[in-house]
Image (cartoon, helix red, strand yellow):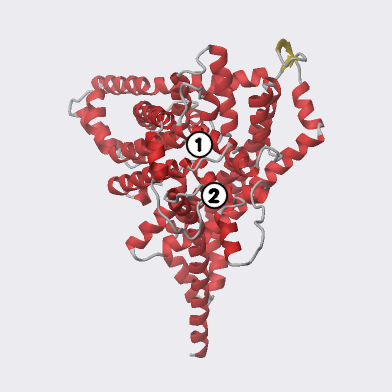
Amino acid sequence: MLKTIMKSERQKVFYWGLLIPTILLLVFFLVTPLLMLAEVSFREVDSYLNIQDTYTFQHYIEVFQSGSYLKTIGTTLFVAFITGLCCIILAYPAAYMLVKAKHAGLRTLLYILLIMPLLISMVVLSFAWIVLLAQNGMINQLLMKMNFINQPIPMLWNLTAVVIALVQVLLPFAALPIANTLGDMDPKLRSASMSLGENRWKTFLRVTLPLSIPGLISGFMIVFSLAAGSYITALLIGGRMQPLLPLTIYQQVIQISNWPFAAALSFTLLVIVAICVLFLGWLLSRWEERVYG
Amino acid sequence: MAKSNNQHKRFNLGTCMIWLLGSLVYLFMTVPVLIIVIASFSPHAYPEFPPTSFSLQWYVELFTSRAWLETLWTSILLVLIVAPTTVILGTAAAVAIRRLNFPGKQALQAMMMSPLMIPHVVLGIAFLYQGTAMGWFGTLTALIIAHAVIVFPFVIRSVGVSMSNLNPILEQASMSLGAGPIRTFFQVTIPNIKPGIMAGAVFAGVTSFGEVSVSVFVTSPQFVTVPVRIFNYVEQTFDPVINAVSVVFILIAVIALIIIEKTIGLTKAF
């Protein structure tokens, strides 16, 4: 008896030994840099943007009092919202097709096509959209050859192009959770509804769709937060002038080196994204409570 | 009879709609990737469509350019350091956290996964600020640390899934037969979660190789990764060599998908 207890104690010590390097890594290289950034967001700066030893709320006040920064926050949330919505709308039929594909080879192919963007660098996919949408890009060339237009239409450097590219880059994050909920669904539920006299359309609306809501919410949650924080695609396709919060942060650091203000903007972004994600998580748990009791 | 016929028709219409919409989505996902492949074999700076001529000049330029090869080497070196390190740390952590119970466990788990959700621009400037303050900015170490933190969640998730399928009875049996914790870990736990570790390694490697949004902040002129170099190029000029570089990324994605499919199967990995 005593021997077994000692043994399980030894095992516990061993497991703690396995965990501690990771805890140290995360404390030093994830928590510490974020805390340092939080600290600098309250520092005063002089007119040369040198960081002072005194503290102030000034940077946060500036963010929330300035019309242009509020507009930037609004646009960022709007773009993230639209991207999330487009992703779940497009991901649904794609995931449905994947789950319903009977031939194993076809299913693997669809899976590969769906996951591909996840494994290719964001910068490569954004570049591909530039090749497609540029003034002398493929779409314009094609349209001119087919005599639909005489002059190339400018398709880059606007928020619509940014959303289109973001949707392609982030769609796998929406498609996978949706495919998972659709795949887990008991096919008997659908046949039960059908045999009770509902047609396919009503069965879809009353059975399939409600049961896939958790997948839709978690897909939207991931895409929304990634879209709200991404600047690579926005910068390459939308250009430097788009009023998006991550872009503004990037510029404050790279071009102006205004650290305290960039840090304040960063924490604003972080908190806003966290609030939205927590809200969606709450919505998800409420829905699951309602469905599963 | 007429009614059921009608219903049958409607069912076909609905299914057709879904397949049509779905196919369009798959097309939308695939076209940019295909375009890059086609463009890389075109001799023109802006590829024509449909393509009329074929050339390997961008590939020749890529593999004879010293600057690109140096960048490629940095990226490969980074993957070779980051993937094994995070796989070892992440596997150890995923196993331990599954078998331990302590207050704050949930918080620690959330912390491990948080680099997935924290906006990368925020992580990037936090790493840059810390690196500058501590004096390791511009070193390879800065890149390794940043990549390790970002890649970590992928390893935790893959190994975690394997761990949740592993019955603790097996480990207890090994212990009661006289094996110590270390022997149990290496001879029972590790062999049983091998697929998860493999998948974690593939994800860690591919993510690290393609990572750009945090790397932009921590690279220095001595250590530029391939995606950061592409980013700098695209932002300033247009260099068609990037078409050929992009195909390298597509090839790596395909190889990764094949490895995942052969080891654990795509459906289980995601």
- Identify the secondary structure beneath mark 2: helix
Q: Nearer the viewer, residue B164 or B15?
A: B15
Left/right placement of residue A130 relative to residue B180 reads: right
Residue kind at label 1, given as amino acid type: Ile
Q: Identify the chain of the residue marked 2, using the numbered disc in the image.
A: A
Residue kind at label 2, given as amino acid type: Val
Residue B186 location in percent, x, y? Answer: 24, 28
Query: Residue at point 53% right, 44% down?
Result: A127
Q: Residues within 10 Å of mark 1 (few under 14, many from 20)?
A: many
Q: Residues within 10 Å of mark 2 (few under 14, many from 20)?
A: many
Left/right placement of residue B38 relative to residue A267 reads: left
Q: Which mark is residue B230?
A: 1
Query: Residue at point 31% right, 38% down?
Result: B198
Decide: is B222 above or below B118: above
Q: CA distance from mark 1 to mark 2?
A: 14 Å
Decide: is B118 above or below B4: above
Query: Residue at point 63% right, 66% down?
Result: A148
Q: Identify the chain of the residue marked 1, using the numbered disc in the image.
A: B
Residue A81 location in percent, x, y? Answer: 65, 48
- Identify the secondary structure beneath mark 1: helix
* Residue behind mark 2: A131
Residue A24 in view, yes or no:
no
Q: Nearer the viewer, residue B51 or A46?
A: B51
Tell me which corner region of the image, top left, top right, bottom left or bottom right, holds residue B213: top right
Residue A87 location in percent, x, y? Answer: 57, 53
